[in-house]
Amino acid sequence: MTRAAVAPIVGLVCRLALAVILGWAGLAKLIEPLVALQAVQAYELLPESLVPVVGYGLPLLEVALALFLLVGLLTRPVAIAVIVVMLAFIAAVASAWARGLSIDCGCFGGGGQIAPEQTRYVEEILRDLGFILLAGWLVLRPITRWSLDGRYAADHDEATDEGGDEDEDGPIGAEGTEETTAR
């Protein structure tokens, strides 16, 4: 297999892995919303008025990102959003650690105060850095196997390959762009 043939498969694995991870994290929090609120509150970073916004909003964001990744739609912007979310998680965990808080991250449900010997800050940060690497691959190579993005790109390439510079709505465009010439 050539490198060009392997890249979409690696991208598929990254995309589906992140979809499962984010879906699992979001659904776990949606199932127990009061526990999710408690987890957000345990970080002691937000004013009380913002705790419900983050506690209820974060799981919805995670599930939405998971669904986009699952179908492979808007993969690059979604991967960028995942990186931003993971960096925020890393900053929150590092802040809790630096301030001497003993909390469970609440990343996959649960959360709140725990015994100091139960904290797993290093593992949580390293795990999120791993997720950033997966998302980084998708930022660089968003077209993956079995994705709507890939389907659109293939349809677009077929239309321009057939000499159809125009469709019913006008010019298709993007000829000579980096995205189409790189394939």
Image (spheres, grey):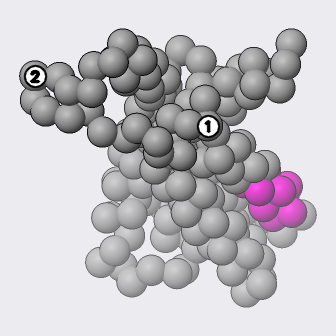
Q: Quadrant of residue 55?
A: bottom left
What is the x, y in percent for residue 87?
A: 63, 66
Q: Amino acid at mark 1?
A: Ala
Choose between 35 and 131: the one closer to the eye: 131
Q: Is residue 104 visible?
A: yes
**Dot 1 corresponds to which residue?**
182
State which quarter of the image contains the N terminus: top right
Mark 2 lies on a secondary structure that is loop
In three-dimensional space, the C-alpha distance between marks 1 and 2, rounded to whole angstroms, equals 26 Å
User: Does the magenta stretch mainly form a helix, a strand or a loop?
Assistant: helix
Q: Residues within 10 Å of mark 2 (few under 14, many from 20)?
A: few
Magenta segment: 121-129
Task: Tell me: residue 123, above or below residue 20.
Answer: below
Residue 76 part of the magenta segment = no
Residue drawn where x is 13% and y is 33% of the image: 170
Residue drawn where x is 56% and y is 37% of the image: 181
Q: Is residue 29 visible?
A: no
Q: Amino acid at mark 2?
A: Glu
Q: Residues within 10 Å of mark 1 (few under 14, many from 20)?
A: few
Left or right of 135? Residue 120 is: right
What is the x, y in percent for residue 145?
A: 59, 18
Residue 122 part of the magenta segment = yes
State which quarter of the image contains the C terminus: top right
Residue drawn where x is 84% and y is 19% of the image: 2
**Dot 2 corresponds to which residue?**
168
Task: Tell me: residue 135, above or below residue 1.
Answer: below
Choose between 118 and 158: the one closer to the eye: 158
Q: Earlier in the sequence, mark 1 or mark 2?
A: 2
What is the x, y in percent for residue 122?
A: 86, 63
